[in-house]
Image: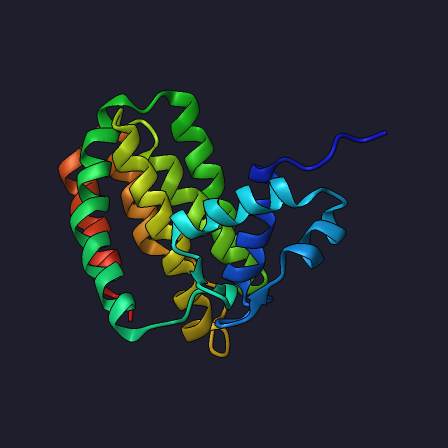
Amino acid sequence: MPAAPTPDLIADELARRIIRGELIAGERLRQDYVAAEFNVSHVPVREALLKLSARGLVVSRPNKGVHVAPLDPLAQRELKLMRLALEPLTLLHSVPNLTPAQVQQADELRQACDQASNIYDWEEQNRAFHIKIYEACEMPRLLETVENMQNLAARYILVHYRARWRPRIDKDHHGIMSAIRRQDAKSAAAILTRHLQRLN
């Protein structure tokens, strides 16, 4: 008999659906429905929803339950400014510590981005690429903050680009990887800054 899903697994699956737009902004997440779907009690569901609230993906309203967080243009602008401030900093500190294995994994994710045939696969691989090149920064709180920003920003990216996305080679990713291989953290961070500035 398979083990029951943990709160982390439930939160991750619900986060995936929210990011992809399968659960839309404002939609209510009823604990009893979620518990029935995952065949668990309400306790792990409550924990999962608390985790999603901490990530900014859901909001809890008194007497109204838990709802998918709204898509807010002001929040989108704030996320862009935060990403511009924090992600190049994270990369600066990560590049000197990346192992050859991590560099190889990052390049595989870069290739997966370039080869993606739909926006959902591309977005997941793109997010994974960015987290991979940051993961050696040796600052866990910063990395957690950046990962949360990535998840929140992904919702806006999918909304804005879903209708006009096309498969493409990401030259910025190539440039970042070239700088990483040279151990040139400043150049990698500069390319990343330019890359992030293009976001709507």
Q: Residue at x 35, y 31 (%)?
A: 135
With 188 as the anchor, is 161 left or right in this view?
Answer: right
In the rendered image, is residue 199 in sight? no
Colour setting = rainbow
Q: Nearer the viewer, residue 85 or 172?
A: 85
| Quadrant where the image shows the C terminus | bottom left
Residue 96 location, x and y as percent?
Answer: 22, 24
| Quadrant where the image shows the N terminus | top right
How many numbered discs sit on the rendered protein? 0
Q: Residue at x 50, y 60 (%)?
A: 19
Q: Residue at x 27, y 24 (%)?
A: 138
Q: Is residue 51 above or below residue 171?
A: above
Farthest residue, direction front: 63
Residue 134 location, x and y as percent?
Answer: 31, 36
Farthest residue, direction right: 1
Q: Residue at x 53, y 53 (%)?
A: 15
With 108 as the anchor, is 152 left or right in this view?
Answer: left
Residue 154 sits in which quadrant?
A: bottom left
Q: Is residue 112 above or below residue 95?
A: below
Farthest residue, direction bottom: 163
In the rendered image, is residue 105 in sight? yes
Residue 52 location, x and y as percent?
Answer: 47, 50
